Image (cartoon, grey):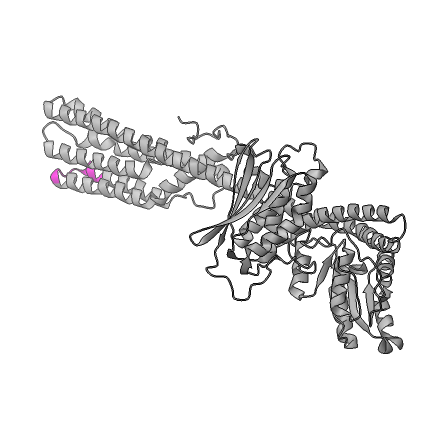
């Protein structure tokens, strides 16, 4: 018997990994259900043929014992029709008992019918012998169709009747009866063989079905576990990122204020080094935040015609110093081509590719070029670096995976840049391909739709994204403002005041010190109640607040978006609201984006903050970074 074939005992096949331990019972249950589905038809056919045989025999040769046989035969059929049957609510563990019961029942039916050949077959009545042979063979053929799902029942029904017929025919001894006996024996063997094959096919299909169902269920459990793990990771990273950004935000603000105060002091170089380190750490956190934004689905591409020459100029301006410092050549080739894309997101993709190429190139250089191919444009970033082995070319787009950096050298980045490229590629529908030879270099190719003709009013499409836009902005804009702070205080005080709401005292102090150092009047509040007091004072009308600057996450479960909007409604303020946040949780980022309120992500770069304030506050003048 096949290892997965059900038996009539309580034993089940030896389970394989991923296969349910009760597989044998479940398969047997399907077999039992199949034979009981045809239970009524089986009884009617069998006893109908028996009754017809009895009528023919009585008409042909009236005998009282024929009527008695018919009465007993039909009574037995009525008892079988009324007896309890298997149904779908029968427990699985009772399946074996019902299989045995049905097999015993059909065996008894067959044994009762097996008396007919000995009663009706005679050497001098060939027509009766022929009729009886046809009836029994037909009954067995019908049984084979109905009972092959349950092999013991098939054997129990077929063997007694057919063996009785064969023996009764052979007993007559003449050539015709011997021929019928041999024919019946051949038919019996054929029937059992076909029934066994059909039984095996059905069993194998059921085993495969239940194994697939078990594997699908296991896969569902594993997918659910993976989704829970991913959600937990996202929550952990969001919390950790926020908690890290808070002190880093305060350090950046204090450092920017200190750098401004020491600009003419001999300690200014140390202050500049401090700010470079702070900005480097901030850029790392920004990179992780970009991944959270992309996964959160809070970025909606703004597709427009993009001038590749303008974007390439920005790339060259951004990376020329880095290439020169590493003694590498950076070649950016003009093409005059325009493409359909989101300029900010495309810029981020290309800047990540160029930055990655420079990090992994020790000799030679990096080239950026664009070529038109039919209705598409290929943008290629080529380098003469270490190359990528074929088995690693798919993995380089995984988070934190880096080629030849097992020690996690910080100078080679975090290993997230290409992961962001892959996410943006799917978001923008710009397929990215990589080809490489170890020791010879690597080529990344983006495929973008071509703009047939340049717009009449050409725009500089590679202008760096402002930080308040909740999208994956370049961590290093084309204008190198990341590592610098305004060099001097504003020549005149800005008109109006800023109301700063933040629940952390150190951040309120750092922000106030930085803004006051640039001639901006600041009033601070730790919560909504203190902000209401500040707005309700008599002096608030004479010197109104022109901007509400709110931290998103406040104490006691409040958030700056709700607090700021409530203050605007309560006091009828025209002052715009700007949020500052270190959040990376997808649901919170989606809510901020949906509000349309400008947002700055911690740690806030001082130059970026002052540029934004300059948009809202007339009279604020700062030296361009």
Magenta segment, which residues? 60-68
- Picture coordinates of residue 517 (x, y %)? 87, 61
| Residue at 50 percent of width and 30 percent of height | 16
Answer whether residue 294 is visible to the viewer in this image.
Answer: no
Q: Residue 396 at x, y = what percent?
A: 59, 39
What's the residue at 86%, 71% (across, down)? 534
Q: Quadrant of the N terminus?
A: top left
**Can you tell which quarter of the image residue 515 is in?**
bottom right
**Image coords of residue 372 (percent x, y):** 46, 51
Dominant secondary structure, magenta = helix
Which quadrant is home to the C terminus?
A: bottom right
Residue 119: tell me if it is visible: yes
Does 540 sit above or below residue 390? below
Above-or-below relation of 293 to 383: below
Q: Position of residue 81 (x, y in %)?
A: 34, 45
The residue lying toward the viewer, choosing from 330 and 427, is: 330
Identify the residue shown where x is 51% and y is 49%. Answer: 370
Between 88 and 341, the residue placed more toward the observer is: 341
State how many labels appear.
0
Task: State yes or no: residue 545 in magenta.
Answer: no
Displayed quadrant of residue 478: bottom right
Judged left or right of residue 481, residue 104 is left
Left or right of 479 in this view: 343: left
Quarter where residue 357 is shown: top right
- Left or right for 604, reference 254: left
Look at 12% across and 37% down and name the residue there.
61
């Amino acid at each position: 018997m096949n290892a997965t074939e059900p038996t009539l005992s309580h034993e089940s096949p030896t389970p394989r990994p991923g296969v349910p331990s009760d597989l044998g019972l479940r398969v047997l249950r399907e077999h039992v259900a199949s034979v009981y589905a045809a239970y009524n038809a089986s009884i009617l056919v069998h006893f109908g043929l028996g009754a017809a045989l009895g009528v023919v025999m009585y008409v042909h040769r009236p005998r009282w014992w024929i009527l008695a046989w018919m009465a007993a035969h039909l009574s037995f059929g009525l008892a079988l029709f009324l007896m309890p049957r298997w149904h779908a609510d029968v427990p699985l563990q009772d399946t074996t008992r019902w299989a045995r019961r049905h097999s015993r029942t059909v065996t008894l039916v067959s044994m009762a019918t097996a008396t007919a050949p000995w009663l009706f077959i005679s050497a001098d009545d060939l027509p009766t012998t022929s009729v009886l042979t046809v009836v029994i063979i037909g009954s067995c053929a019908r049984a084979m169709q109905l009972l092959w799902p349950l092999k013991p029942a098939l054997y129990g029904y077929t063997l007694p009747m057919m063996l009785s017929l064969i023996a009764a025919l052979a007993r007559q001894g003449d050539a015709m009866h011997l021929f019928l006996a041999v024919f019946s024996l051949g038919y019996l063997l054929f029937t059992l063989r076909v029934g066994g094959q059909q039984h095996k096919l059905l069993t194998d299909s059921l085993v495969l079905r239940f194994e697939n169902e078990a594997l699908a269920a296991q896969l569902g459990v594993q997918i659910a576990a993976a989704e829970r793990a991913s959600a937990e990771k996202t929550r952990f990273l969001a919390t950790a990122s926020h908690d890290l950004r808070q002190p880093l935000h305060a350090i950046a603000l204090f450092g920017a204020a200190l750098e401004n105060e020491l600009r003419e002091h001999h300690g200014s170089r140390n202050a500049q080094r401090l700010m470079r380190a702070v900005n480097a750490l901030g850029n790392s956190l920004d990179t992780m935040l970009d991944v959270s934004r992309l996964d959160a689905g809070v970025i909606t591409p703004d597709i427009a015609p993009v001038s590749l020459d303008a974007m390439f100029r920005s790339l060259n301006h951004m990376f020329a110093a880095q290439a020169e410092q590493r003694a590498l050549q950076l070649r950016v080739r003009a093409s005059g081509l325009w493409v359909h894309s989101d300029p900010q997101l495309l810029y981020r993709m290309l800047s990540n590719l160029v930055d990655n190429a420079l990090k992994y190139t020790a000799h030679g250089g990096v080239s950026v070029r664009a070529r038109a191919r039919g209705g598409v444009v290929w943008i290629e970033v080529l380098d003469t670096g270490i190359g990528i082995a074929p088995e690693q070319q798919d993995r380089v787009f995984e988070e934190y995976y880096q080629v030849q950096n097992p020690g996690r050298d910080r100078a080679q980045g975090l290993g997230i840049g290409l992961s962001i490229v892959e996410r943006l590629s799917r978001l923008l529908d710009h397929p990215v391909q990589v080809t490489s030879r170890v020791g010879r270099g690597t080529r990344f190719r983006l495929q973008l739709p071509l703009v047939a003709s340049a717009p009449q009013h050409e725009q500089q499409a590679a202008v760096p994204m402002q930080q308040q836009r909740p999208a994956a902005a370049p961590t290093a804009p084309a204008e190198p403002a990341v590592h610098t702070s305004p060099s001097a205080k504003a020549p005149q005080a800005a008109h109006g005041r800023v109301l700063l709401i933040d629940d952390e005292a150190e951040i309120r102090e750092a922000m106030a010190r930085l803004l006051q150092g640039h001639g901006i009047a600041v009033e601070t509040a730790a919560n909504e109640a203190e902000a209401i007091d500040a707005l309700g004072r008599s002096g608030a009308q004479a010197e109104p607040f022109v901007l509400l600057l709110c931290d998103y996450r406040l104490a006691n479960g409040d958030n700056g978006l709700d607090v700021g909007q409530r203050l605007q409604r309560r006091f009828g303020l025209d002052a715009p609201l700007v949020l500052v946040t270190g959040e990376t949780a997808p649901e919170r980022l989606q809510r901020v984006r949906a509000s349309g309120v400008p947002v700055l992500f911690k740690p806030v770069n001082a130059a970026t903050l002052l540029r934004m304030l300059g948009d809202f506050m007339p009279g604020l003048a700062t030296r361009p970074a």
